[in-house]
Amino acid sequence: MARVRSLPAAVVLGALAVILSPTASADRLSFNYAQADYVEAEFPNAGDDFDGGGLVLSADITPTMYGYLRGRTVSLGGDGNGDADLNAYSAGIGFHRAAGGNDVFTPFALFTVEHLALEPDGGSDENETGWGAEVGFRRAYGRWFQLDASAKYYDVNDLGNNDFGYQVEGQIDLSERFALSIAYEDIQEYEQLSAGIRLYFHSPFTGPD
């Protein structure tokens, strides 16, 4: 999957270009959203590509703490009827706080329980459960674009190994409630590109942002 392997340099260059650009005022960076993604992924040693979909739900529990759920499934072969399905589920608690009292730059940390399930056609399923940690920042550029960058660590035993990685994600706001998202994630031998649509909402626990 040459196009996925060529993404890191492009993503890094794009991120640097945005980081070095002038920053305008922005609304508070929201951690209250639901997101649906199309996912394309690669294991370099698998000899094939995966594609599938995913859902993410994030909501503030307090002004500085949020809950996080993510589920993704990808199928070997890229046609949805491949030789195996890999399902990944995350559930956790995160913390965020605007730096310097402004709404433009917000560091965050997320701690999750991770579950991986490999379901080969005609074979026995394999399941592993572990944990993950992520530390990064969310930064707004004007009222139409924001960038997330984070470092990650996963400990999910045999299926996931104990791996460090990173993720870069950009969101383009279409309105106050909808945004387009594109993300690149690299966790050792696993590379993932996703594109999706995000819906922002008011948390039932904290009210309007």
Image: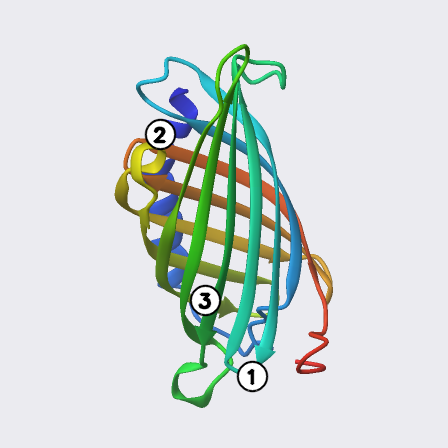
Dot 3, crowdedness within 10 Å: few (<14), some or many (≥20)?
A: many
Q: Which colour scheme appears in the figure?
A: rainbow
The quadrant where residue 10 appears: top left
How far from the left and from the top, in percent, is residue 160? 34, 37
Q: Where does label 3 land, which residue?
A: 138
Distance (Cα) linking label 3 and label 1: 16 Å
Q: Where does label 2 land, which residue?
A: 6
Q: Secondary structure at mark 2?
A: loop
Q: Work out which quarter of the rendered image holds the C terminus and state it.
A: bottom right
Q: Nearer the viewer, mark 3 or mark 1?
A: 1
Reading the chain from its start, which is encountered first: label 2 or label 1?
2
The quadrant where residue 8 appears: top left
Q: Where does label 1 land, which residue?
A: 63
How far from the left and from the top, in percent, is residue 9? 31, 39
* Amino acid of disc 3: Arg
Reading the chain from its start, which is encountered first: label 3 or label 2?
2
Residue drawn at 39 percent across, 44 percent down: 11
Circles 3 and 1: CB atoms closer than 8 Å: no
